Image (spheres, coloured by chain):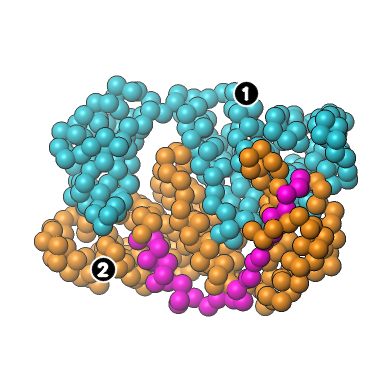
Chain colours: A orange, B cyan
Amino acid sequence: MPNPTAAMLVIGDEILSGRTRDSNMHHLAGQLTARGIDLSEVRVVHDDAVAIVTAVRALSAAYIHVFTCGGIGPTHDDITAEAVARAFDTPIGVRDDARARLQAHYDRQGLELNDARLRMARIPDGAALIDNPVSAAPGFTLSNVHVMAGVPQVFQAMVASVLPTLTGGAPLVSRSLRVPRGEGDIAQPLTDLAEAAPDLSFGSYPFIRHGVFGVNVVVRGEDPGAVDAAIARLAETFPDAVPE
Amino acid sequence: MPNPTAAMLVIGDEILSGRTRDSNMHHLAGQLTARGIDLSEVRVVHDDAVAIVTAVRALSAAYIHVFTCGGIGPTHDDITAEAVARAFDTPIGVRDDARARLQAHYDRQGLELNDARLRMARIPDGAALIDNPVSAAPGFTLSNVHVMAGVPQVFQAMVASVLPTLTGGAPLVSRSLRVPRGEGDIAQPLTDLAEAAPDLSFGSYPFIRHGVFGVNVVVRGEDPGAVDAAIARLAETFPDAVPE
């Protein structure tokens, strides 16, 4: 059985403007791969209701799981919760369970649960809350969409809350070799090896380091023995290769 | 007149597996913003022909410019050129001008232009070549899609070749302030400021540093004077803020 598929939607003006370099995509990708869930597509869109609704509908229909990050804070540009509710034609409002979490958190800190903060208790009807051990304001799961915060520490904590609840697949094992040659020199032998091992996937990722061309060859598969055997054949074929 | 729009398509198994952290998206986003072109959407897909064709068609129809990165090397998993040709129902084959560039490059290095390397001379009919001063193998522009390499040094060189040929818009000016308060404390005053300056965009990006909550407030707009004035008003409203 193929592994479950997933997509990620980054609501990220700050990524699209070049101000911030993504870290959440990188984190989620590694976590899903380790759990045997195939991150198949990522989209990054503006903090724009139509863009979010369109993407949520498309990704939710196409993949088993969808993870969003960003846009669930207290400010005027935080519109993700409303947009996800709209994508599923679901009503949204301040929910008592979410409000109670915020009230307890701000009471402990001696801060006021003002109108802006109360926006973070707006949860679509029927959604399940996602714990936020960092700053209380919860994420939520509506249908197959997991709505999470954009602040990396909070995002990572929410991923840690959600992932154990999902059915994973067979984790992919991956091993890589660094070959100090141009990609054009290894292409044909690599194709031959890939054809001889159809259950494995062979990726070649060229790089330039200190002005010298090289290739990282990555072998992935579910069977660690088969992956190791392929790496051994690669090392025979390219005696100048080193483990990466 | 609104600024031209753009989208990016990253062909990136290595991004989706979590093996590599993106840098090309971050680079292109900054370059486009500086040129007054609005990067409106990014998609990351597998090295899969159907996924690439589908995304190229959707993005090409929706945005003025599309930039792809990755999958144009010499190995079996480099399928981007064929997929982009297919997206436009355009024939593709080894083209003499591209072959001549590769021949000259490998002759200089005393390397053979073998079958694998010759794959990099496959260019769709009617496409314009994009210079590659790093490793010769060209990118290409077909319709409104600019097809570029994934190796960051080559990608950046190709972006530098293409961008001056595009009509930009008014560059957005952006200034930011770091406010050492929770986002919930600044949400209402920020909304008031945003409503008083409808030509500017106000973004608030919360962070946690050394366990303390804070917010980076970013003001963007085409008129540097208006942006500076808004930043001055923000600094009055939040006397504890510091320029970021």
Res. B40 in view: no
Residue at the image position 35 percent from the left and 61 percent from the top: A154
Task: Determine which of the numbered discs, if any, sits on residue B165 in the image.
Answer: 1
Label 2 crowding class (10 Å Cα cut-off): few <14, some 14-19, many 20+?
Answer: many
Residue A150 spot, x, y in % from top left: 38, 55
Position of residue A2 in the picture relative to residue A68 (left or right): right
Q: Which residue is mark 2?
A: A98
Q: Chain of mark 2?
A: A
Residues rendered magenta in the picture: A154-183
Position of residue B94 in the picture relative to residue A5 (left or right): right
Up-down: is B209 above or below A213? below
Residue B9 vs residue B206, the one in the foreground: B206
Position of residue A227 in the picture relative to residue B6 (left or right): right
Residue A186 spot, x, y in % from top left: 80, 52
Residue B23 vs residue B141, the one in the foreground: B23
Q: Chain of mark 1?
A: B
- Residue A178 position by quadrant: bottom right
Mark 1–mark 2 Cα distance, whole angstroms, equals 52 Å
Res. A113 in view: yes
Up-down: is B144 above or below A204? above
Q: What kind of residue is marked 2?
A: Ala
Q: Is residue A72 magenta?
A: no
Q: What kind of residue is marked 1?
A: Thr
Residue A146 vs residue A168, the one in the foreground: A168
Up-down: is A72 above or below B9? below
Q: Tell me the element at label 1.
A: helix
Residue B58 spot, x, y in % from top left: 62, 46
Up-down: is B108 above or below B47? above
Residue at the image position 37 percent from the left and 66 percent from the top: A157
- Residue B106 position by quadrant: top right
Kindly give the residue lying farthest to the front in the view shown. A240
Residue at the image position 82 percent from the left and 48 percent from the top: A185
